[in-house]
Amino acid sequence: MHTHTNAAVQMRSPIDDDIDEYVPENTHTPDTGDNSSSNRLFSSHIDPVIDNLHPTSEGLLARFHDSDVTPVPDTLPESDAKKTIITTYTAPDNSSEDEKHALRDKEDVKGAADDGETEEDSPYEIVRHSVSNKDSPDMYSLTFRVWLLGIIFTCVLSFVNQFFFYRQNQLSLGGSVVQLLAFPAGYILSRVLPRRKFTTFGWTWSLNPGPFNIKEHVLISIFATASSGSPYAIDVVTIKKIWYQSDLGFVASLLFILTSQIMGYSFAGLTRKFLVYPAAMIWPATLISVTLFRTFHEIQDFGGKMSRTKMFWICFVGSFVWYFVPNFLIPALTYIAVLCYIAPNNIIANQLGDSYNGLGMFNFTLDWSTISSNMGSPIAYPWVMACNLFAGFVIVMWIITPIGYYSNTWNTGNMPIYTAHLYQTNGSAYDIHAIMTPDQHLDEAKYAEYGPVRMTFQFAISYGIGFAAIITLLVYIILHYGKEIYQRMRQSRQMEEDIHMRLMSRYEEVPHWWYVVLFVITFTTSIVICEVYHMMPWYWVIVSTVVPLVFTVPIGIIQAISNQQPGLNVITEFIIGYGLPGNPIANVTFKVYGYITMTQALNLVSDLKLGHYMKIPPRHMFIVQLAGTILASFIELGVAYWLMNTVENICTPEGYPFTCISANTFYSASVLWGLIGPSKLFGSSSPYHPVLYLFFVGALLPIPFWYLQRRYPTSAWRYVNIPVAISIAGAMPPMPTASIVNWFIGCFVFNYIIHKYHNTWWKRYAFSLSAGLDSGVAISAILQFGMFTKAKMPQWWGADANHCKLAPTGGFMNRPANI
């Protein structure tokens, strides 16, 4: 989901494995930590790409170790950190050839040494706990199975995630589903595909080179998730077609998406020397995936229990069938607004109880898509971090917003309490076409006559809190990680190559000129697109490219060490808003090239580090990342145009469930930052000028909590994480408020009650259950769309998805509060 002011931190979500529980004896576990921060909240990559929140560094891995994704058996305590147990698997003489091959493959994964001597390991404990210091250069990686499964999973994820992008509940399938299903799928293919060899242009290959191995598994996952979430550029395509009524066209839209996505590859490749190769650049989030992949392939103890794959399919079927009830038969179960049932004619009760245009109080659900669609699965979040986030939600939405709104701050009492829509001063809808020239720029005379744009109190204050969140995150990083970042930067320049870099030196590296060629092609194409289709002047394309060029390395260093990624979205909005006011399309285009290019680059750098740890040949990584991105872009744009051209009243309340809540917010941001401009929006004469002072508040906010955590290190203060707490404001709007309420309830049930009192079950099945529920809902929704597009249920109480009729119709000041 796209947010307007959110400081971004990318995360690879905790995911489920298919291997039955195996806990090696005497395994050393790193110290835990609870530091975390916020992301381009709630995005669906894996996330789901709205931006996710996550623990960091040792705390991140400690959570995974506590979640049955344990370090591999050859990990030793600190005193023996430089030693590795050498294990050799020997097949009995009567074993079949397949069994012997499988055992040799397993031996390769464990990296048995030739002489069994003490071997070098990483200088960093957190890496030693997760990453093998061995490699088998002969292990095949880019195989037919990778291409087949990679293409299938890329198509499925891209289709599903783009389909749900336009829906009210934006469910997303991510890497968890791929990693879980690719393992048994690869195994099945290794058993059924013929092993015949073929020769094509002098290259010998086979449909089935042998047992499915860990490198294939990693490449399939990277292939499918390289660009499986809805690209930011599709927001621009959508608002141009729906709101600005100037369709960019399929070909131009495709080139726009491809250039914005692929340009990040060039920055990722050209920064490898600084962000991938040095041992000091750890990228803690990738260690989760490393640990999980190794758990799949190195721990084989099925123990007679129900496997996680079976749990996945049981949950998948149950979720698939049940979703027919809230999605088609009884939509009222999507949000059960208790206050609106009690007082349907009371405007305040409607505003407090509604989810879409209210505060979500006492609003519950029996629909899994409501729980997981916007925030991601509640099972993927540590309980302490969920408490921080929900506390921030309560403060912003249930305390600050009602006080500001019902005191009629900025004369917002004649507007709904919660929405991203824009208004005139009298509370009527704002018509942008009344203030634009034919070429869709601001007409100053018409604007002066029509009147200034106004937004709700909550929408305005969310911008201010978003400003504070950016500075808070930077100060938080300096206070908590400043010394470590400085030391790691020095080490990265002085330290010799570690064992992982030397192992990777066996493989052909991707030449720099490959990335330079990619940059030249995408940069040139970007200028052509922007000039020919009047999206942005060519010189602003250059400026937008300079932004990621300058910030990718420093922000990448911060993320590689602290797992925090400060976002550039507000910076880019201010730059283009002041530099080219009155041009909304140029504003969002600049943000795509200036902000998303860097975000995509750092996503790819993170994957490159994963490949570095897993000893994947760099050229194979390059191929699957590029192929996955190109394929996903075609599918996502195709789905977008299909829905925009076939769904009646799409992106309006009448088009429910295809209401495009993210695109609505993106459109409003284009008006505020682009058409109107920050000089008018936050200038000294604007009622919203005071929100700029929250930049200074954000600089001071982390300091007292940092002091209390240092002064009382064992007290409850150690659990407080201010960047996480205030980051939720960046997603409000467009997120339905009751969605986070029910998400928190789900997190309480799974990650507190079940995790505490049924820990064995939780460690074994929780993530498989989550992936099964998500997948079942996604496939069921697509099937129902095809089956019931023109079918309508009889009108009755349960057929209405929203029983808070007064919440979206106006403010409390222009309606009597009758019961």
Image (spheres, rainbow, N blue to C red):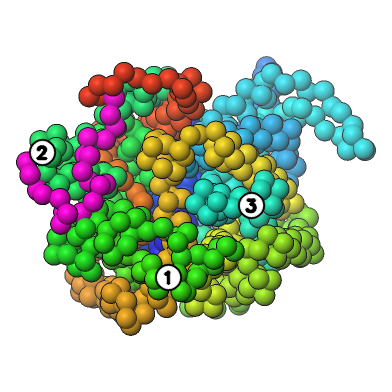
Where does the image place residue 679, in percent across and percent down from the top left?
A: 42, 78
Q: Can residue 227 be found in the magenta stretch?
A: no
The one nearer the camera, 782 or 755, is 782
Mark 1 residue element: helix
Read off the residue under disc 1: 447
Kind of residue sitting beneath label 2: Ala
Residue at point 29%, 45% (across, down): 356
Mark 3 residue element: loop
Kind of residue sitting beneath label 1: Tyr
Task: Please tell me in which quadrant of the rendered image residue 432 appears.
Answer: bottom left
Read off the residue under disc 3: 248
Where does the image place residue 596, in percent across and percent down from the top left?
A: 56, 61
The CA distance from mark 3 to mark 1 is 26 Å
What is the span of residues highlighted in magenta in the rendered image?
799-819
Read off the residue under disc 2: 343
Kind of residue sitting beneath label 3: Leu
Mark 3 is surrounded, within 10 Å at the Cα level, by few (under 14), some (14 to 19) or many (20 or more) other residues, namely: some
The one nearer the camera, 160 or 332, is 332
Residue reaching furthest to the right? 202
> Quick one: label 3 or label 1, which is nearer the N terminus?
3
Chief secondary structure of the magenta portion: loop
Tell me, yes or no, if residue 566 can be seen here: no
Residue at point 29%, 32% (across, down): 801
Labels 2 and 3 touching (C-beta < 8 A): no
Mark 2 residue element: loop
Where does the image place residue 813, in percent across and percent down from the top left?
A: 15, 57
